[in-house]
């Protein structure tokens, strides 16, 4: 059992919980995911099964897309709806939400929140946060490709709330983005809801629930799907045999000048090879 399983994670469970359940359902130990979703968030979790776990280095750094809701006027200690309210300011004026969102486009730096799985001095930040400890965190480079309001702004109970879609680079915390949006508008804010809709080339529209998997109503993606954007180089039986043995291959045999290529045989992923001195050497091989 080897492949990519797309799961629509429900609210209220951790990504680790999902893997634990799938391990029992599928009766397989070799399984993992490519990017954590908070318990308060739902949506696409890309799960790697069997030899597909070797794909992790190629999928953890992919861009992601989300749909969510931001509440302006109240801040929480966890930056989302699961936390305690730590600040409030009545919203009494109409806000230029669209103008504010446009200021976030492009490359920038973001400081990871304390309630995150980022490790510092051997401990996850959320473990320190639960002990009431806050430490200095280094800002990380991120890119916001798209950030757009997709609902009317609802003004009620001295707050403003609206839905949005976002397309961002790896390592972007949407919770922190919500807080920063509030700051630029002059108010405390937090992320009220979040649903991940895409991870790289994979969409939540093709994902299955845990109940689907338990009932056997699912289909795993072929591992070559992970490299749709890069393109796949299909080889014949003779070269496939060399690849399975981890042999270096002269660039003339592959008829390509790419520095890095993804190789497949009869539609099945074989390896990722890198070029050096007119020869290609195995970076990763799937047997």
Image (spheres, rainbow, N blue to C red):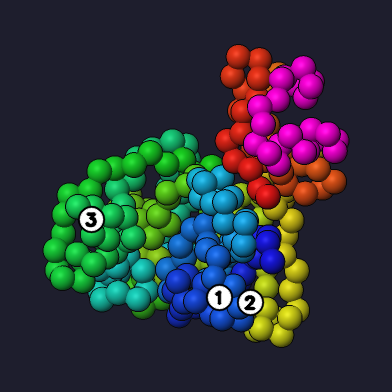
How busy is the neighbourhood of tag 1: few (under 14 within 10 Å), some, or many (20 plus)?
A: some
Q: Are marks 1 and 2 in contact (CB under 8 Å)?
A: yes
In the rendered image, which quarter contains the N terminus? bottom right
10 Å crowding of disc 3: few (<14), some (14-19), many (20+):
few
Picture quadrant where residue 247 is located: top right
Badge 3 is on which residue? 122
Residue 132 numbered mark, or none: none
Task: Report the number of discs.
Answer: 3
Relative image position of residue 47 (x, y in whole percent): 58, 63
Q: Earlier in the sequence, mark 3 or mark 1?
A: 1
Q: Residue furthest front?
A: 245
Q: Nearer the viewer, residue 170 or 54?
A: 54
Q: CA distance from mark 3 to mark 1?
A: 27 Å
Magenta region: 235-256
Residue shown at the point (46%, 65%) measured from the top left: 37
Label number found at residue 23? 1
Helix or strand or loop: what does disc 2 sit on? helix
Q: Is residue 22 above or below residue 201?
A: below
Pick the residue in front: 168 or 13: 13
Horizontal placement of 145 versus 244: left or right? left
| Residue holding disc 2 | 26
Which residue is located at x 62 percent, y 69 percent? 7
Residue 156 position by quadrant: bottom left
């Amino acid at each position: 059992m080897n492949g990519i399983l797309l799961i629509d994670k429900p609210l209220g469970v951790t990504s680790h919980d999902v893997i634990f359940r799938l391990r029992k359902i599928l009766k397989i130990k070799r399984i993992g995911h490519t990017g954590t979703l908070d318990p308060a968030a739902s949506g696409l979790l890309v799960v790697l099964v069997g030899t597909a776990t070797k794909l992790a280095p190629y999928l953890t750094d992919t861009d992601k897309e989300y749909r969510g809701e931001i509440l302006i006027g109240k801040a929480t200690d966890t930056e989302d709806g699961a936390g305690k309210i730590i600040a409030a300011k009545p919203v009494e004026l109409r806000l230029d939400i669209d103008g504010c969102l446009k200021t976030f486009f492009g490359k920038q730096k973001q400081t990871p929140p304390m309630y995150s799985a980022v490790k510092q001095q051997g401990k996850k930040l959320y473990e320190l946060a639960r002990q009431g400890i806050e430490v200095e965190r280094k800002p990380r480079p991120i890119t916001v490709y798209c950030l757009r309001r997709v609902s009317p702004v609802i003004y009620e109970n001295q707050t403003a709330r609206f839905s949005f879609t976002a397309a961002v680079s790896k390592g972007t915390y949407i919770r922190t983005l919500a807080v920063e949006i509030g700051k630029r508008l002059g108010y405390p804010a937090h992320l009220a809801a979040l649903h991940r809709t895409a991870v790289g080339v994979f969409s939540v529209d093709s994902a299955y629930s845990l109940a689907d998997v338990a009932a056997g109503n699912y289909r795993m993606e072929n591992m070559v799907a992970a490299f749709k954007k890069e393109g796949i180089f299909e080889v014949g039986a003779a070269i496939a045999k060399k690849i399975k043995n981890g042999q270096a291959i002269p660039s003339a045999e592959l008829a390509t000048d790419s520095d890095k290529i993804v190789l497949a045989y009869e539609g099945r992923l074989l390896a990722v090879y890198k070029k050096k001195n007119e020869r290609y050497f195995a970076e990763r091989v799937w047997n």
